Image: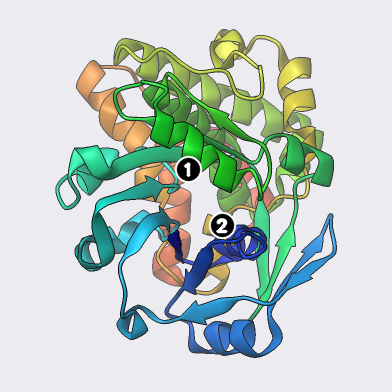
Amino acid sequence: MNIAVYGCGSLGTIIGAYLSTTEHSVDLVDTYDAHINTLNKEGATVEGTTDFHVNVHALKPEEITKTYDLILLLTKQTYNSTVLPMIKNILKTDGVLLSLQNGVPEELIQQHIPKKNIIAGSVEFGATFKSPGVSALTTDFTAFKNYALQIGELNSEITLRLKTIKTILDSIGNTHLSDNLLGTKWSKLLINSAFSGLSAALNCTYGDVLKHPLAFKIAMIILDEGIKVGRANHIKFAHMANHPIDNFENHNAPEKLNSFMQPSKNLEASMLQDLRKQRQTEINNINGLIVEIGEKVKIPTPFNQKIVDIVTTASQTNQLPEFEKSLKSLLQNV
């Protein structure tokens, strides 16, 4: 099977590295010249909570000369308008595009790729891009291997092709099959809005949020806003690693939420990494999406809006947020 990992940043590098240990033909696709060159010359290195190295084959989009049976989409949603038409040209007519992007991008993807060719998923581990060819796994290694990915059909069926793709992805880590795809994507969106959003807005790791009482309180408020918005939008939330997300509504079960997030305590939001590199963030596709849908279903989302404001200002001014200053701004909403 011809497989492409399209978008090889922190997550894509790790996914591509482990897939490259299989019998399949795997290409890591990215636009970063130095990264592509290092991957081809020195291989992919995964450090952090593990130590793994493997030779890989990498190339730039314009260098692709074949079509693929399976494409794993890991680019940021901000690039979808240019990336998706390119993917359409390299995906076989009976091929599968597996969307592993943050948020809920499948509606936009269907404007370019036929619905029958799409499977959606959720990455359940965190990583940091360290340097060309090197990515650091920030999630506990055992947790990563036990629960690396979650995938599902758009119609919620557990199909033969879904099971086939799982056997391939299990080389990365245990891949769970979902019969509630939309609920899965929403549950992941809510965790990202609370912890990735705060990581970017406070310029800190998830662990910094978990151990700071006021920051953690704000995380629970952000999560509560998202739960209420999703419920009003008729979403049936999927469990995250056997944790019912809606159990955290109304700021309930803080100890369980803290425990649930501990394996990701070393994670730093990719949006924060984008701010440091002066790149466009996905804030409008994460916290901004909750604000947008909240307006439609008439659920107030002041804390999600404040996160959007802080990160947007940081992006526009090229100045990283300051923990205490951002925290004070958020606490004005309490």
Q: Is residue 197 left or right of residue 214?
A: left
Secondary structure at badge 1 equals helix
Q: Is residue 248 left or right of residue 105?
A: right
Q: Image quarter for residue 215?
A: top right
Q: Nearer the viewer, residue 124 or 27?
A: 27
- Residue 130 higher or lower than 237, as above or below: below
Residue 81: horizontal and vertical position, in percent?
21, 61
Q: Amino acid at mark 1?
A: Ile
Q: Which residue is labeled 1 in the image?
A: 307
Quick check: can you spot residue 56?
yes
Residue furthest out toward the left = 111
Q: Which residue is labeled 2 in the image?
A: 270
Q: Is residue 216 left or right of residue 186?
A: right
Q: Nearer the viewer, residue 287 or 73?
A: 73
How has the structure been colored for display? Answer: rainbow
Sequence order check, earlier mark of 1 and 2:
2
At label 1, counting other C-alpha atoms closer than 10 Å, the crowd grade (few under 14, some 14-19, many 20 or more) is many
